[in-house]
Image (spheres, helix red, strand yellow):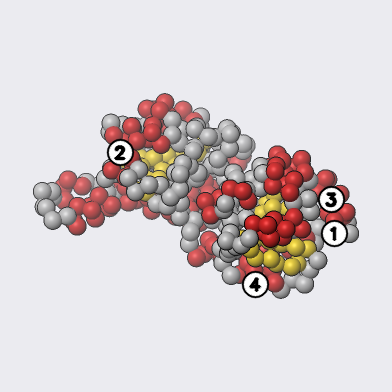
Amino acid sequence: MANLVYFENWMDPIGPETISASSSIELMKMLFSDDPGQTWRVLETAHGYQCLPSTETEEQFYPSADFLTRCPNLLAISVSGAGYDMVDVDACTEAGVLVANQSGANAESVAQHVIGLMLSLAKQIIQTDRAIRRVDRNWTRWDYVGSELTGRTLGIIGLGKVGRRLAEIAKVFSMNVIAYDPYITDDDFIERGAMSVTLKDLMSKSDFVSINCPLTEETRGMIGEPEFDAMKPSAIFISTARGGIHDEVALENAIATKRLAGAGVDVFNAEPPAHDHPLMRFENVIASPHNAGVTTDCMFNMAKWAADQWINIFDGKRPQRFINPEVWPKFSERYSEIMGRPVAG
């Protein structure tokens, strides 16, 4: 019997329901308010750990090297969505712990959120809504002339599951799509409907820039003052990826000096951001609390995908969404020792 632990909730009830239907997995729910000693005793016997998003997880329960040392029976870790920046993947690989995510489960929800931000800012929907609610009427509709998406250029940084779906939707608006992603081939760009360009060219040629890549040591701080300076004054910046990829101070400066026409920001360095965060003072900035993927559809997908993947993992099968595939030989040895049977293949 495999022991699978999780904290608080599982995004959608379909997750626990699916797991509970398996006779080979014992599901153990914990609360952050539980006695810490008891919590660690449960974790120390766990074979699997289903993580909550980083913003809802206490840092002591991030899957770090120290965490792994305290949990010697742990075979696998699964994150709730696509992002896994709170997981020390190198430490997991060294320890023989498999890491999986739910990449693609949120693609539709996030891509639609990006389009929503683009439309709202281009058409000045948010600005007119705020204006019409004010008592004063020192404005006319001609003060809020918008623009269409039609024929504009969308630059996508990161052409993975979300970026690919975003490119597809953008084509419905007859947009030109360019992208920067150094980890895919020329054929991938063609298949995903985008023209490959350098980061520098993307920033200078795009009418809209959308960040859709993971937060890694390579991407941390990737978009800063030089990148914002390269953008058109009429361009709009969008990020629904992770806080830390773009420099918040540099973005604030670009908006304040009118070097950008607007920004849609779903992710921040500290989440949720303070109500008086500097970006909140601008009419042409739309902020959302990292909820681009928080839809009933997405949460169902993430919960169901994770549950199905856990059943495969504990059956000794390779997961469909594997972050560290190089761990498989060591994982296979540990799986055989701990579960008392060989992996399926």
| Secondary-structure class at tag 1 | helix
Tell me the residue that label 3 is attached to: 334
The structure residue drawn at horizontal position 78% and vertical position 50%, both measured from the top left corner, is 72
| Secondary-structure class at tag 3 | helix
Q: Residues within 10 Å of mark 2 (few under 14, many from 20)?
A: many
Q: Of the residues under marks 3 and 4, which one precedes in the sequence?
A: 4
Q: How far separated are the C-alphas under marks 1 and 3?
A: 8 Å
Answer with the quarter of the image where residue 299 lies. Answer: bottom right
Q: How far separated are the C-alphas under marks 1 and 4?
A: 23 Å
On screen, residue 336 versus residue 284, left or right, reads right
Residue 194 rendering spot, x and y as whole percentages = 51, 41
- State the mark number for residue 106: none
Q: Of the residues under marks 1 and 3, which one precedes in the sequence?
A: 3
| Secondary-structure class at tag 4 | helix
Q: Residues within 10 Å of mark 3 (few under 14, many from 20)?
A: many
Q: Amino acid at mark 3?
A: Arg
Q: Of the residues under marks 1 and 4, which one precedes in the sequence?
A: 4
Answer with the quarter of the image where residue 316 lies. Answer: bottom right
Would you place residue 256 above or below residue 323 in this image? above
Q: How far separated are the C-alphas under marks 2 and 1?
A: 57 Å
Tell me the residue that label 1 is attached to: 339
Q: Amino acid at mark 4?
A: Glu
Tell me the residue that label 2 is attached to: 261
